[in-house]
Image: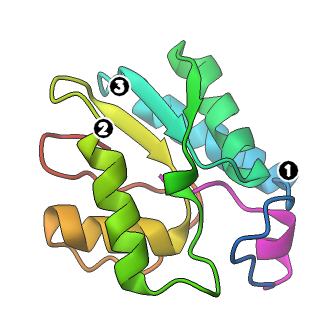
Amino acid sequence: MRHGQSSWNAVGRLQYDALHPELTELGRQQAGSAARELRDRGISALWSSPAVRAQQTAAIVAETLGLDVQTSDLLLEQSARETPTDVADRVLSFTSQLPDDAVTLAVSHGDVIAIAAELLAGLRTGILPNAHWVETPGGQP
């Protein structure tokens, strides 16, 4: 799932690996709406990038789903020093740690999700809108 709208998204500013931009009010509303849609999806684990915008999104989802948020640096947005292959390697490292029987929601960033969608599900999604998600094999949103 991509994080809700951040203050930098709102003004068209690229964030890359900047951790501090926070959610806007719209971003909080987007996260709440997404959480309600995800409520009956059987999600049993919730992970997030350590970026503030992702953590705030995950906290809103966690409250609705009754889950704790776990954090992984492997979910961080692509930095200016990384290639898409580097991000793909991070995605594979992250998913290899997940139990097969868990339905996991990972709150991350547009570029990471686009790479993960293609790598794990063969989907070319491009950058998803804020607070949208894609499901990968096994039904994991």
Q: Which residue is mark 2?
A: 97
Closer-to-camera residue (4/19): 19
Pointer 1 and pointer 3: residues touching (CB < 8 Å)? no
Label 2 environment density (alpha carbons within 10 Å; few <14, some 14–19, many ≥20)? few
Q: Residue at x 54, y 43 (%)?
A: 72
Pointer 3: what residue?
A: 43
Residue for point 85% across, 62% down: 21
User: According to the image, label 1 marks what residue?
Assistant: 25
Classify residue 14 as left or right of residue 112: right
**Is there CB contact under 8 Å for labels 1 and 2?**
no
Query: What is the distance, in whole Å, between disc 3 and disc 2 at their CAs?
Result: 16 Å
Considering the numbered disc 1 on the image, is that residue within a helix, a strand or a loop?
Answer: helix
Q: How many marks?
A: 3
Query: Which image quarter holds the C terminus?
Result: top left
Please tell me in which quadrant of the rendered image residue 29 appears.
top right
From the viewer's side, name the closer residue of 128 and 58: 58
Instruction: Using residue 58 as the reference point, say whether residue 18 is left or right of it.
Output: right
Which stretch is magenta?
Answer: 1-12
Q: How is the image coloured?
A: rainbow
Q: Kindly identify the residue that appears in the image at 61 percent across and 86 percent down.
A: 81
